[in-house]
Image: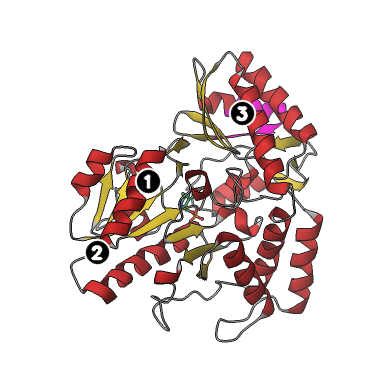
Amino acid sequence: MNIIEQTNSHIMPTYGRSEVVLDNGAGATIRDENGKSYIDFGSGIGTASLGYCNQAWADAVCEQVRKIQHTSNLFYHAPQAKFAEKLCAMTGYEKVFFGNSGAEANECAIKLARKYSFDKYGKGRSTIITLVNSFHGRTIATLSATGQDVFHNYFFPFVGDFRYAKANDIADLHEKLDDTVCAIMIEYVQGEGGVMALEQDFVDEIRKLCNEKDILMIADEVQTGIGRTGRLLAGEHFGVQADVTTIAKGIGGGLPVGICLAAKKCADVLGKGAHGSTFGGNPVVCAGALQVLETLDTPGVMDGIAKKAEWLRGEIAKCGEVEAVSGLGFMIGISLKTKKAPDVLKACLDKGLLVLTAKDRVRLLPPLTISQEELEAGLKILTEVLEA
Ligand SMILES: Cc1ncc(COP(=O)(O)O)c(C=O)c1O
């Protein structure tokens, strides 16, 4: 059996996979088992933030593997402590909780918000408002939080007390808000929902309402966070800090990690025994994630990401087939005039470029450290496909 047959025979068919067996990579270029090269404008759905086999990241991870690969959270270890300290310093949050995925980070945020409210106000304030078209994960609670009917099938009963307000509709938000609400949870740019950025006045209104009513503002930055939009957190574009922010995807540089960041007022809500994760804060993952932060903290790097992203967005917008370019920074959605996104994905793949789709859009999430040469090579293929 070849790799594709082995996979299809033994792994549950939950993904629609392209018929390519990826084998090795360097920078933003990845190769398949036959040696064919692809420029990767998807970075493993936004996870390989420093590209493939970044030297400093690989060294940090390998060095840690040889020291201690895992120890439980019943002890202390340096990679976890150092990474947590740097993450708090760079983001302005007080404390973090470590899990292993975006969904888990959001589970933690949901639990934290409900307990924050319970501790202060008792029962009856457990409703969380999320947005129509949002995506927050695949666990039962995060599916329940996800504001898309298509995800609310088969797995009944879902978790109660989630309410969905229309994005950018302040009147609808007010209508959904009552005294049972303990949190409002948003993505600044809806990723899986089609790469749609929220509007400034809507975000401002959420921040204002949360302050007035002592409701927690939760920002799901699983996809938008850690440099993806040209700022460390996408909230910076809006001049807002949520009370709780979740990150995952890019922070590990390709290793599984999901983190819930809490501001001072709710940093100690989850006490001993209230939450946990066997693998959360694993030393190897923390050593790699610390290297991601150190790279992004190097002077000029974040500005460089923002500039490269602006350039790419501008070039894509010039293409005649492109209706509009949405998103922020290196989180790019492309609406097409005549072509279908899955056809573009397939044609790009054939020519050596990996892209993603979201709803009816082509979606790009290139590695943050992609070189100008790789950007130009990928853009050339994309333009050829769009103009064919
Ligand atoms: C905004 C957002 N939240 C949560 C998730 C779930 O993350 P994970 O697949 O790591 O559980 C995703 C994944 O795409 C996401 O984009």
Q: Which residue is mark 1?
A: 204
The image shows residue 208 at horizontal and vertical percentages of 33, 52
Label 1 and label 2: CA atoms lie apart by 23 Å
Dot 1 or dot 2: first in sequence order is 2
- Label 3 crowd (10 A; few <14 / some 14-19 / many >=20): many
Q: Which residues are magenta?
A: 345-356
For the question of whether residue 27 can be seen, the reply is yes
Badge number at residue 289:
none
352 magenta-colored: yes
| Residue ID for mark 3 | 313
Residue type, label 2: Ser
Residue located 61% across and 53% down the image:
250
Q: Mark 3 falls on what kind of element?
A: helix
Q: Amino acid at mark 1?
A: Asp
Q: Considering only vertical position in the picture, is 354 above or below 73?
A: above
153 lies left or right of 340: left
Q: Give x and y (percent) for residue 226.
A: 59, 53
Say above or below: 32 vs 287.
above
State the residue position of label 2: 126
The answer to whether mark 1 is within 8 Å of ligand 1 is no
Graded by Cα atoms within 10 Å as few (under 14), some (14 to 19) or many (20 or more), the crowding at tag 1 reads some
